[in-house]
Image: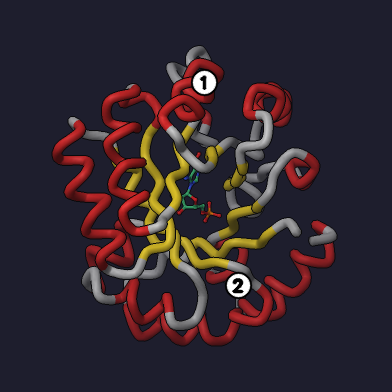
Amino acid sequence: MKQLILALDVMDGEKAMEIAKKVAEHVDRIKVNYPLVLSAGVGIMKRLSEIKPVIADFKIADVPYTSSLIARIAFENSAESVIVHGFVGSDTLREVCRVAEEFGGKVYAVTELSSPGGEEFMSAVSLKIVEKAKEAGCHGLIAPSTRIERLREIRKAAGDMEILCPGIGAQKGSIEAVKYADGIIVGRGIYASGNPAEEARKLRRVLKI
Ligand code: XMP
């Protein structure tokens, strides 16, 4: 079953809870990022996890020890998975996976960012990142819906690793991404609309997921 994942980048905890409750029946997981966690506090992850599993998108990108601390904080606060940058290399990837394993959690590695800047440096190494992420024991990858030809390549290299794709909606990613992805991540297209529940429901229909 392919998933629809809400990227909840609002900056008010109560607003986040209100949107999460409204869209709950139409989304499979909720992804939190710095805007919400730095505004509302790390405790917001536990509250949201009572509604849907939470992906902590901290795009971890540090030396192994510091990265392990960040991952630990995420899992101790009820995250079911974390996102780590792939460009950090094998040692950090392995260390984050080791912490995830302690909690029965999952790790997704960013291959190349969906934004145009992702092409400047990351596209050149993203297939190598796939390899390193697989070797390190990552459960899945984050890959762009905004560059379908790259996504197709990443899918080929990824084998049976899970792929989550951001970019549909505000970043004008292609809905064709659903062919190659296991999950579609949408933020502004849902939470910034007048009716988030209805938008999420419509998206599921359009994406046929
Ligand atoms: P929007 O509002 O653009 O939100 O639908 C997308 C969400 O996904 C994050 N994002 C990414 N995360 N790799 C990632 O790991 C990416 O290439 C990428 N592009 C967008 C973004 O931070 C937001 O939370």
Q: Position of residue 148 (x, y in %)?
A: 72, 31
Q: Secondary structure at mark 2?
A: loop
Eyeballing the image, is 27 above or below 111? below
Amino acid identity at mark 1: Glu
Eyeballing the image, is 110 above or below 150? below
Eyeballing the image, is 115 above or below 164? above
**Is residue 111 among the parts visible in the rendering?**
yes
Q: Secondary structure at mark 1?
A: helix
Residue in the foreground of this view, choosing between 173 and 140: 140
Q: Position of residue 99 (x, y in %)?
A: 28, 48
Kindly identify which residue carries mark 1: 131
Residue 98 lies in what quarter of the image?
A: top left
Residue in the foreground of this view, choosing between 94 and 49: 94
Kindly identify which residue carries mark 2: 193
Amino acid identity at mark 2: Ser
Q: Position of residue 151 (x, y in %)?
A: 67, 30
Look at the image and tell me in which quarter the N terminus lies. Answer: bottom right
Look at the image and tell me in which quarter the C terminus lies. Answer: bottom right
Which residue: 51% across, 28% down?
134
Which residue: 83% across, 66% down?
205
Check whether the beta carbons of the residues at disc 2 and disc 1 lie within 8 A of each other: no
**Is residue 117 among the parts visible in the rendering?**
no
How far separated are the C-alphas under marks 2 and 1?
38 Å
